[in-house]
Amino acid sequence: MPQSEKIPLQRPRKKEIENIRGLFSLLRLHPWAIPAIIGLGALSSLAEGFGISLFIPFLNGMEQPAFHPDTGIWLADTLAGLFNHVAPAHRLMVIAWFIFGAILLKALLSFSTTALFAWLDMHAAHRLRSCLFNRILRVEYGFIEASPSGKLYNTLATETWRTRDALETLVDLIISLCMIVVYTALLLLISWKLTVLVIIFMSMISGLVRVLNRYVKNLSSKLTHTNALFYKRMVQALEGMKVVRAFGREPYEQNRFNKASEGISRLVMKLTLAASLVNPVYEILAGGLLVYVLFTALRTPAGLTALLVFIFILYRLQPKIKELDEQCIKLSSLSASVADVMSLLDRAAIHPSSPSSGNVPVQDLKKGIHLHHVSFYYPNSKRPALRDVSISIEQARATALVGPSGGGKSTLIKLVLRLYDPTEGEILVDDRPLRQLDLALWRKQIAMVSQDVYLFDATVRENIAYGRLDADPDEIVEAARQADAHGFISQLPDGYDTQIGERGVRLSGGQQQRIAMARAFLRKPQILILDEPTSVLDTISESLIQDAIQSLRQECTVLIVAHRLSTIQQADHIVVLEQGRVCEQGDLRQLLAAGGLFAKLYELQFPKNTA
């Protein structure tokens, strides 16, 4: 197994407790809910305990109609005393009605507990998913770039639901504890000696279950890691399907997928078998305990009725302890999922919406954007992506960024978008530091078309309208015309209402690019960023797009990243980047006359033009 895919070591128990405590952070908006649920659970337990205890005077009354509280057992004598004032002829009926009332009250309280938790669960689970997605949307961009997409998918799609299960299990565990406390108190009131024996036996049983608990917890950590690996395999294969088929790697990918899936299946089976051991262990040990208590009770001078009730309470207590241990095991099995979700929330909090927004309103661009001695290092990188870059992107002009791959062109775009802030230097917008501007308003002034087009699994209309959600149908059509997309859109089965599939899979690369162009044009931006925008277009479409860009240039500032130098023939200013530095800048004629790197790149693409 590669180093990067090693299964993590099991977390210390202290860390696990911290993870479980993190579940309560989901309830901050409803701080009253957990105390209310616990209170209802405790009242329900008390109602059931009271109802069971009433069987002592009821059974004594059946055996001795004129019974008196002199059994020597405090609980039995106290309950018998409650009904001494009732006429013997009606005493059993009254006690029976009290028992029924206790059962009814217990049922109502149990339903109230379940209903309240269902309401809480709905809100808490939604809040968890919403909060996590909100953090991912707004977290520092470098965090997204550094996080494997498969792991993010797994956390959002799977681990959030398992965390919701953990919250439910935690509440059930607390309610089970309440019931165990009530039952144990009743047992102590009937016979403290027998209760001590019961506690010793139950502790032994729980000790055996804790051994299973540690095993399950370790399996759970492995399952969480294996799930993330499975999602990674699946996402890579689906998103890279074209490469998979082009290289004939279907058997290879099937094998990798099968191994990941089989790994999950094996771990799930082990978890299921480990959990299934709980029932046999309890049935054997608890059965022996009941037999022992029964023989002990028969040798005691206390009232037989009270001891029978003791055994009945013990019989009711045993499954509650079993449930408690099962809930502990389940909570342990889900602790890795809770840790995964909380870790992502914590890491997203450590990397907040950075860069942080300024508070200066964004005005229409008047002068342009100026990079003043800008240098930038990516996180954990010792090599600068940009070094002492000083350039001007003038308003209402087209500025092109060219140069070899790895020169820093895409990094510069990220700085203009303010996905990152410069490590050194400053970016000025109309002589005002970009850091001071309202970030949301700044990005509203920008539209971008990249070579790697992303289209949503929606209609053509919805994809174009994503550029400006309040656009009317005529504006959408006009933007499509500008992008030379209206013609082919009109020929689609449902025109603008045609579903284009995930990432626009039902369209050609050129059609996808033109829809992306239309989306950008619809935005009517102050700044239009084009990252290799015409790389997949034919010559006619490229010419039409360039004409549209020329017309837009009168209204907005255009920043073009290009490897195909035909794209930047009409650029007003060209900046040549190499290894993060500006090695040349000027217009087309100046750079060709200089005979530098740009001239060499130009000659490679247009040898006849430079002959």
Image (tube, rainbow, N blue to C red):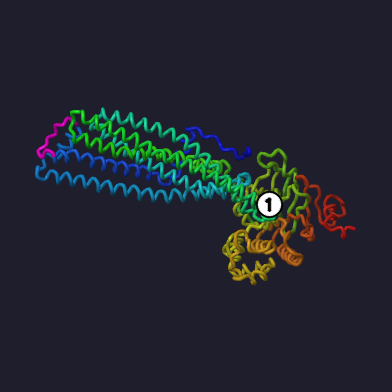
Residue 330: name its quadrant. top left
Can residue 357 be seen from the camera position used here? no
Per the picture, the main secondary structure of the magenta-coloured stretch is: loop
Element marked by disc 1: strand
Residue under the image location 78 percent in, 55 percent down: 573
Residue under the image location 71 percent in, 50 percent down: 410
Q: From the top left corner, tell me how far across and down residue 404 is, in percent.
A: 78, 49
Residue type at numbered disc 1: Val
Segment colored magenta: 63-73
Residue under the image location 47 percent in, 33 percent down: 13
- Name the residue carrying label 1: 429
Q: From the top left corner, tell me how far across and down residue 535 is, in percent.
A: 73, 59
**Observer-nearest of 208 and 334:** 208
**Observer-nearest of 158 and 326:** 326
**Observer-nearest of 344 and 152:** 152
Q: How many marks?
A: 1
Q: From the top left corner, tell me how far across and down residue 43 is, in percent.
A: 29, 42
**Observer-nearest of 290 and 64:** 290
Left/right of residue 465 with respect to residue 308 in the rendered view: right
